[in-house]
Amino acid sequence: MELSGGLRSFVSTWPTVFQFVLLPNGGLHNFDISMVARYNESTLEPLAEIARGVAKDNGFVFAEIIPHSISRMYRFYNKTLPKDLVQFPFVASDGHIDAPLAFYSQWEQVTRAHAGLLQNARHTEHLLFVRCRPDVVFFRPLWLHKYNAQFNDSGSRAHVSCRPSTFSLNDDMVIAKADAMNAYAAKHPWDQAEPALRGVITENYVAHVLKPFNVTLGDQGSAILDLYYLQDFVEDGIYRSAKHHGNCFYGHEAKGKLAQPVKSMIAFSNANYQQELGVLQHLKLLVNHSIDCKCEGQDCPCAVDVQDSTMYRLA
């Protein structure tokens, strides 16, 4: 299993990965786990320290919890850092967002995590690879043997949750055979001009690179948990999505199917959660925790729009 991308809400989403991915599929000893996660060094160092502890305690074969670094990304791709780039690697001094650079910034973590797993794996063979963002949350068990059987029967080599648009595939998570995962996580040539490097870069790239592998689609019972709504999820069992982070998750299908509260999960640490909560409260990154669902009844998915977010009652 490979976790790659921004660190964000990992401290509180990891218990759901442990509960709904690792335990149903034989436990930790059946997995090699790697993680490469970026974070804002000036504000989230305490969360990075917790994440390093989680990686150590759970026997990750490879873990790099590293600060955002423009220069590191350029060195990774053997490129010279332009003088007109400022705080983020995809924003120039005139405020223009360079979509290809945003892609390279994200995919560096994907490539590093996959290479780190392969180089440090304890197992000599892997039936499947699961790659997801560190801030992914699972709502129900992910039975990997079903995907393996599906691949063997259908000839497909990869599965993602949905297609956000005609020419793109969701880039939050993938379940894949080795050949598809190797292509998915490959170090992309910096100067390679492809149609995939236009528009919404990462989603278009995933569609482009997985096209030869007869990719299948279907809800995996997962979504991205924004830091802003972390307290709602951990304490009240409410999932709220911002922007497009819930675009492959269907609240009515998950209602009542969260097997147990996050706080009662085996991998949940109240000490870690309280420290995480304290950091977010200090940074004023939490939304109004008092907002609750407004709909009830058998036909109600318990989803309401609240300041550009969608809320789902899960337990």
Image (cartoon, rainbow, N blue to C red):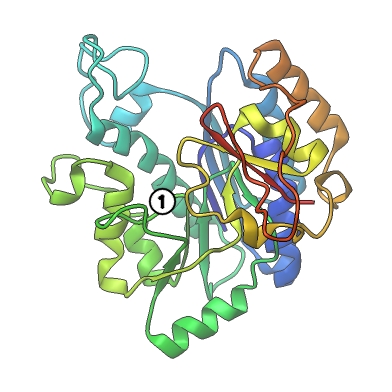
Residue identified by numbered label 1: 171
Q: Is residue 27 above or below residue 280?
A: below
The residue nearer to you, when weighing 312 against 29, is 312
Q: Mark 1 belongs to which amino acid?
A: Asp
Query: Residue at (49%, 50%) from the top-left corner?
Result: 116
Query: Residue at (13%, 40%) from the top-left corner?
Result: 191
| Image coords of residue 45 (percent x, y) | 64, 20
Q: Is residue 172 above or below residue 220?
A: above
Quadrant placement of the N terminus: bottom right
Left or right of residue 56: residue 37: left
Query: Residue at (20%, 17%) from the top-left corner?
Result: 82
Answer with the quarter of the image where residue 109 lies: top left
| Image coords of residue 294 (percent x, y) | 72, 39
How many C-alpha atoms fall within 10 Å of the one at disc 1: few (<14), some, or many (≥20)?
A: many
| Image coords of residue 183 (percent x, y) | 32, 62
Answer with the quarter of the image where residue 70 lies: top left
